[in-house]
Image: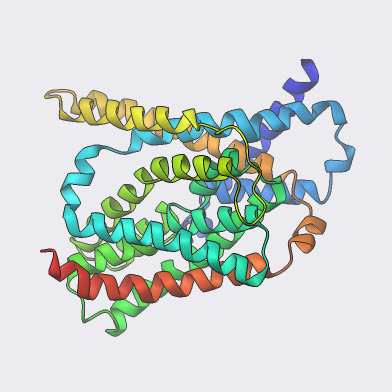
């Protein structure tokens, strides 16, 4: 038990460092969250000092990458409300649904086409479809892939999401997005960028009072779709997948239901009169705790990811993420331009 605590303490210390690094102005300007800094620090540790850590500390590291992960995802639900779903309207909901389902299905087919293993394919596809690193972490207990595959999937969504965070504002300023009105641009941004941080960064860079809030709400609706996606994935994997899934008992993602319950609690509290100031304080505390738990999970995953494992994964996950990225950029634009006006 004492050695397990040592392992947890080690990850906690690295996570605190990652947390403070994410606050450095230069890093913050790139929207590199504490989750991303955590996995980077963990990977540095894995390739330098990991061999010096006693094997008896391993349960502590596993605790952070499993239990801490699920608790962080559950608390993440307190950032969302069902009122957000109503606010964005039917057009945004339809676009979000098409993006999520289309990205996962297309990603699975492309992964099979290029010969990528099932676990990496699903993790990369879900991360690209929903909310980047947080979605990869949410899918990890369902897919049950190796830690380095999770780290690779996170790396792909971070790379392409960061590219979009700079690309979209540039496209907006040079006139490439002039064919879309402000709400369409917001829907396009929120439904196609990978991380919540990327959406916030891109939306604010466009300096428009409609684009930024619309993009964020559309993005948060995508986050809510994580729950049905995990349920369908759990059922599908239990049936045996063509790419090597094993038949067996359905792995019910109970944490996804609790995640949904947290959204419901937040929705009810949000609608109650006179609780605005108190709720803002509580939400702020819960968000900090959630983010730190996810940072610990990312750090623990990074600590189990050596460069040798990256080489073992090869370039195929990045090829897959790149092809999915083209679909998001081009397909998302076409949906925002032609589908959204039809549903106004």
Residue 20 visible here: no
Is 271 situated left or right of 39 in this image?
left
How many numbered marks does the figure carry?
A: 0
Residue 224 placement (x, y as % from top left):
35, 43
Residue 142 visible here: yes
Q: Quadrant of the N terminus?
A: top right
The outermost residue toward the top is: 1
Q: Nearer the viewer, residue 63 or 16?
A: 63
Residue 215 placement (x, y as % from top left):
28, 58
* Colour mode of the rendering: rainbow
Residue 252 placement (x, y as % from top left):
51, 31
Residue 159 location, quadrant: bottom right
The residue positioned 38% from the left and 35% from the top of the image is 77
The residue positioned 50% from the left and 40% from the top of the image is 235
Q: Where 203 falls versus 249 (above or below)?
A: below
Residue 57 placement (x, y as % from top left):
80, 28
Q: Where 242 falls versus 280 (above or below)?
A: below
Q: Quadrant of the C terminus?
A: bottom left
Is 203 situated left or right of 321 in this image?
left
The residue positioned 50% from the left and 54% from the top of the image is 127
Is 41 situated left or right of 20 in this image?
right
Q: Nearer the viewer, residue 142 or 293?
A: 142
The residue positioned 49% from the left and 69% from the top of the image is 324
Q: Nearer the viewer, residue 340 or 14?
A: 340
Residue 137 location, quadrant: top right
């Amino acid at each position: 038990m004492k050695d397990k605590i040592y392992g947890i303490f080690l990850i906690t210390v690295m996570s605190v460092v990652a947390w403070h690094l994410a606050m450095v102005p230069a890093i913050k300007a790139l929207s590199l969250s504490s989750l991303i800094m955590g996995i980077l620090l963990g990977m540095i540790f894995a390739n330098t000092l990991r061999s010096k850590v006693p094997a008896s500390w391993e349960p502590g590291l596993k605790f952070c990458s499993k239990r801490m992960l699920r608790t962080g995802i559950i608390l993440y639900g307190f950032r969302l409300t069902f009122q957000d779903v109503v606010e964005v309207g039917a057009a945004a909901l339809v676009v979000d649904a098409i993006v999520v389902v289309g990205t996962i299905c297309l990603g699975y087919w492309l992964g099979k086409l290029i010969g990528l293993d099932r676990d990496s394919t699903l993790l990369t596809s879900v991360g690209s479809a929903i909310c980047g690193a947080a979605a990869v972490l949410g899918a990890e207990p369902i897919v049950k892939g190796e830690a380095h595959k999770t780290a690779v999937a996170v790396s792909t969504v971070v790379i392409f999401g960061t590219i979009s965070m700079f690309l979209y504002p540039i496209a907006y300023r040079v006139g490439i997005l002039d064919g879309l009105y402000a709400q369409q641009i917001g829907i396009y941004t929120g439904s196609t960028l990978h991380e919540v941080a990327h959406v916030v960064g891109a939306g604010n860079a466009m300096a428009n009072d409609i684009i930024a809030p619309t993009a964020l709400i559309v993005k948060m609706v995508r986050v809510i779709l994580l729950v049905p996606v995990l349920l369908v994935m759990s059922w599908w994997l239990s049936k045996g997948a063509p790419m090597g899934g094993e038949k067996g008992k359905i792995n019910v993602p109970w944490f996804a239901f609790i995640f949904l319950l947290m959204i419901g609690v937040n929705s009810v509290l949000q609608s109650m009169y006179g609780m605005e100031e108190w709720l803002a304080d509580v939400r702020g505390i819960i968000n900090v705790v959630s983010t730190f738990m996810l940072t610990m999970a990312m750090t623990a995953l990074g600590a189990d990811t050596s460069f040798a494992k990256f080489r073992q994964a090869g370039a195929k996950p990045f090829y897959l993420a790149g092809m999915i990225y083209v679909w998001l950029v081009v397909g998302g634009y076409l949906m925002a331009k032609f589908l959204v006006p039809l549903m106004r």
